Image (cartoon, grey):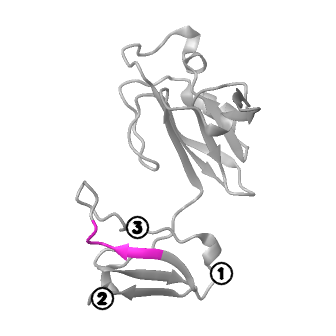
Amino acid sequence: MTGMGKGMMWINGNSIGRHWMSFLSPLGKPTQSEFHIPRSFLNPQDNLLVIFEEESLAPLQVEIMNVNRDTICSFIAENDPANVNSWVSRRGNFHPSVSYIGPQASLMCAPGKKIMTVEFASFGNPSGYCGDYTLGTCNAAATKQIVEQECLGKETCSIALNRAVFNQNGADPCPEILVKTLAIQVRCS
């Protein structure tokens, strides 16, 4: 919504919210510069976007982009909490609902698609974001092979952040890094 002031937006009659570009985050950036249009709001063709602008600005810089949902990623550290679905409540007490209680990378393709390629996988200190991960100074060599074994050909998969799984022959490739991170990028088709 670059170049706009404040107002409302609708797609095919469904509100997608207010835009207010002058409302800045603590980092000095607009808090509402990007909006997600739910697929359920879209028609196969002939979609109508209505932008009501309360200030006298023109929507010349508004940009609509398609996002590729076939590339999915996970970026999780050893000190991240376990998924909330790892627990169930019975008689007022919480009990584990899975065999592994701890952080895990969970990947799920869109319905009807399967994980066909592992484009990036690193357990150590990778950095970046989905679509632009890079290896750090530490990387467990077997990471990509482990992810391929667990995920290829499946619609969904989960990989526990367990050092014993990634450390070959029980040897930690970089013991100086106390908290390791697992970054995964896969392609579904």
User: Which stretch appears magenta?
Assistant: 17-23
The image shows residue 142, relative to residue 148, as above or below, that is above
Pick whichever of labels 2 and 3 is earlier in the sequence. 3
Pick whichever of labels 1 and 2 is earlier in the sequence. 1
- The spot of residue 179 in percent (x, y) is 42, 23
The image shows residue 69, relative to residue 127, as above or below, that is below
- Nearest to viewer (mark 3 / mark 1): 3
Tell me whether circle 2 and circle 3 mark residues in contact (CB < 8 Å).
Answer: no
Residue at 67%, 34% (x, y): give it.
86
Q: Is residue 123 magenta?
A: no
> Around disc 2, counting alpha carbons within 10 Å, would you say few (fewer than 14), some (14 to 19), or many (20 or more)?
few
Q: Tell me the number on the disc at residue 44.
A: 1
Residue at 57%, 9% (x, y): give it.
169
- What residue is pinned by disc 2? 58
Determine which quarter of the picture holds residue 20.
bottom left
Q: Is residue 103 left or right of residue 85?
A: left
Residue at 47%, 87% (x, y): give it.
50
Q: Quadrant of the C terminus?
A: bottom right
Considering the numbered disc 3 on the image, is that residue within a helix, a strand or a loop?
loop
> Around disc 3, counting alpha carbons within 10 Å, would you say few (fewer than 14), some (14 to 19), or many (20 or more)?
some
The image shows residue 32, relative to residue 75, as above or below, that is below
- What residue is pinned by disc 3? 34
- The spot of residue 158 in percent (x, y) is 66, 36
Q: Amino acid at mark 3?
A: Glu
**CA separation, marks 2 and 3?**
17 Å
Q: Nearer the viewer, residue 8 or 49?
A: 8
Q: Amino acid at mark 1?
A: Pro
- The spot of residue 128 in percent (x, y) is 38, 43
